[in-house]
Image (cartoon, helix red, strand yellow):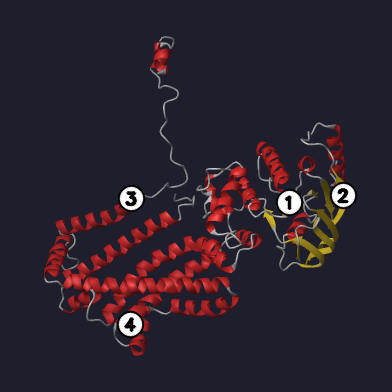
Amino acid sequence: MTETTHRSVVPTVERAQPPPLAPRPRRRRRLGPGPTSARALVVGPLLLLVAWTLGSATGLIEPQTLSAPWTVVTTSGELVADGRLQSNLLTSVQRAMIALVLGVVVGVVLALIAGLTRAGEAIIDGPVQIKRAVPTLALIPLAIIWFGIGEEMKIIVIALSVLVPIYINTHAALRGVDARYVELAESVRLSRAAFVRRVALPGALPGFFVGLRLAVTVSWTALVVVEQVNATSGIGYLMTQARTYGQTEIIVVGLVIYAVFGFVSDLAVRAIERRTLSWRRTLGS
Amino acid sequence: MATDTRELTAVRTRGLTRGFGSRVVLDAVDLEIAAGEFVALLGRSGSGKSTLLRALAELDDGVAGSGELRVPAERAVVFQDARLLPWARVLDNVVLGLVGRGLDDAGARERGRAALAEVGLAGRERAWPNELSGGEQQRVALARSLVREPALLLADEPFGALDALTRVRMHGLLRELCDRHRPAVLLVTHDVEEAVTLADRVLVLDSGRIAVNRPITLDRPRRAADPDFVGHREFLLGAIGVEH
């Protein structure tokens, strides 16, 4: 080692100082927050949980106002034991997933048509903005008349809610794709299809992911509305029933399930986003 | 109109006129570039250099104009910014739009790899454009042009954003690649020395007209200290109106 050879010549006073080539601690970029880790994202919800537990344990939160976390756990246990929780949860997850996939596909296709053609913009954009202004709850009576009270109606209503954030964000991102890349595509004479695949879609991907994160949450919230208005199964139905019988703890179980699913699916989308958009160098990376 | 690239003339314009609103940017330009000829186009900013290049690239859709324009179908453009798609890896950028033009995916990639090796970037195929330096990015852009085997290479101040040292190295690379592939080249630049170093012929565009047409017959490699080089440089500096 170099230090050994130097030791004889270097005065004792200087040897006390750190060697000049010692690795310095790497400094974080000063203005950017640095990368987010999944672990850090859990901190906020965990703090909420701690506050809830402490509040219930000290009697600050009365059981009539909000059931204690341990009550929620035991109630969940009972619901699982008699099989109600699993079956209702499965129904809800199925509805949300099918509607999400449907809404995402339709939203992306509509955004592409509206973003890449003039006629599409004229025909599609207005109605989507109108749909955005109409509350899901207000749509349900009509949807029941049109599609009946079966699964079809529920999935259509949820999918309609899902496609809005997908459409808005994908469309905006598509419109924001740098004109220089369009010029490049023209200069290498890309076909229309290749342009969509190589330039338009990847360029709109960051916006699409913002839309997807909103859409995932929307699929859960729309699910509640649909299931609470007209259903014989699902988490929303379970909660509506509990309300009728004044079982606050079951309502809270339902809320916790919505919260957990919403949060976990958002984390999942973010993880996919990070992977897919790994080429980006941004404030958050 | 596309023409046969085996012709001796790569580019031919007659009375090429382009304008924005009431402002005439190109005023009846007659230009011929022989196959394999390296032409540099000088001019002050606003002289119409980029408009002429974009007209030859047929990238000026929607710009009002008239005149006869004949350019080969196989042409490539190098922009001032490397203009790499940030979401595509280096090799995917190079072969962009190549598949389906008589090449399958594997064939295109093989050619793309060869082009990257030619610009000294072998092994960087899987890198993201963001990970490369400015000079490396511009070399990828060069590879993207070369891989198309263009009969006409149009370059719009391709080295304008690079530092002086990198620029000199890029000059050498561009000249070497052009000697090997022999495309006709139109290099738009505002750098007189760059024009004299690289070109077989230098044009000066002034108010939308070609004001100077000067063949440069110096031997290569060209040295800026050579008295003949200095002569050309001084003449051209005068032509674009630089007082010194």
Q: Chain of mark 1?
A: B
Foreground mark, 2 or 4, reads 2
**Three-letter code for the amino acid on which mark 3 is drawn:** Ala
The answer to which image quadrant residue A48 occupies is bottom left
Q: Chain of mark 4?
A: A
The answer to which image quadrant residue A87 occupies is bottom left
Query: What SS does tag 2 mark?
Result: strand
User: Which x, y percent locates residue A152?
Assistant: 33, 82
Label of residue A152 in the image: 4
Label 4 – label 1 distance at C-alpha: 62 Å
- Residue furthest top in the image: A8
Q: Which residue position is annotated with label 3?
A: A40
Label 3 – label 1 distance at C-alpha: 56 Å
Query: What SS does tag 4 mark?
Result: helix
User: Which x, y percent locates residue A214?
Assistant: 40, 66
Label 2 – label 4 distance at C-alpha: 74 Å
Label of residue B213 in the image: 2
Q: Chain of mark 2?
A: B
Residue located at (28% from left, 70% from top): A93
Residue located at (22% from left, 81% from top): A232
Q: Quadrant of the C terminus of chain B?
A: top right
**Three-letter code for the amino acid on which mark 1 is drawn:** Pro
The answer to which image quadrant residue A20 occupies is top left
Q: Quadrant of the N terminus of chain B?
A: bottom right
